[in-house]
Amino acid sequence: MTREGALIGPSPTPAGGRPGRPVPCDWGDEHYARAATGRTPLTAAERQALGADAARFPLFS
């Protein structure tokens, strides 16, 4: 499973923990990795775009 156009390789846990589900935010690979590990907190706009999936962040640590 990979994000479309991902440069960092396969993601063990896609956003929301559902295979093949794209992140509904315009994130580059670096931001995705930081947000998914909790190194960068989600903004209010990102939380809104992610909806209920925002509660699953960080996806892995």
Image (cartoon, rainbow, N blue to C red):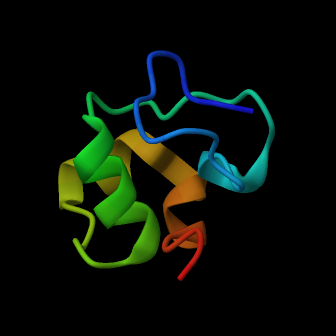
Where 4 falls versus 48 (above or below)? Answer: above
Q: Position of residue 23 (x, y in %)?
A: 49, 35
25 vs 39, nearest the viewer? 39
> Which of 42/38 is in front?
38
Q: Is residue 2 above or below residue 55?
A: above
Residue at 21% across / 59% down in the picture?
44
Residue 5 locus on image (x, y percent): 44, 16
Q: Judge by depth and name the residue closer to the eye, 55 or 57.
A: 57
Specify whether 54 is left or right of 41: right
Q: Nearer the viewer, residue 30 or 15?
A: 30
Locate the N terminus and report the quarter of the image it occupies. top right
In this picture, residue 47 sits left or right of residue 37: left
Numbered label tally: 0
| 36 to 2, vertically: above or below | below
- Residue 19 drawn above or below residue 43: above
* Extreme residue toward the bottom, this view: 61
**Which residue appears farthest toward the right when viewing the image?**
19
Tell me where residue 2 appears, x and y as whole percent: 64, 30
Task: Tell me which corner region of the image, top left, top right, bottom left or bottom right, holds residue 38.
Answer: bottom left
Q: Residue at x 63, y 47 (%)?
A: 11
Residue 25: image location, x then y, percent: 33, 33
Residue at 21% over, 48% down: 45
Position of 47 with respect to 41 (left or right) is right
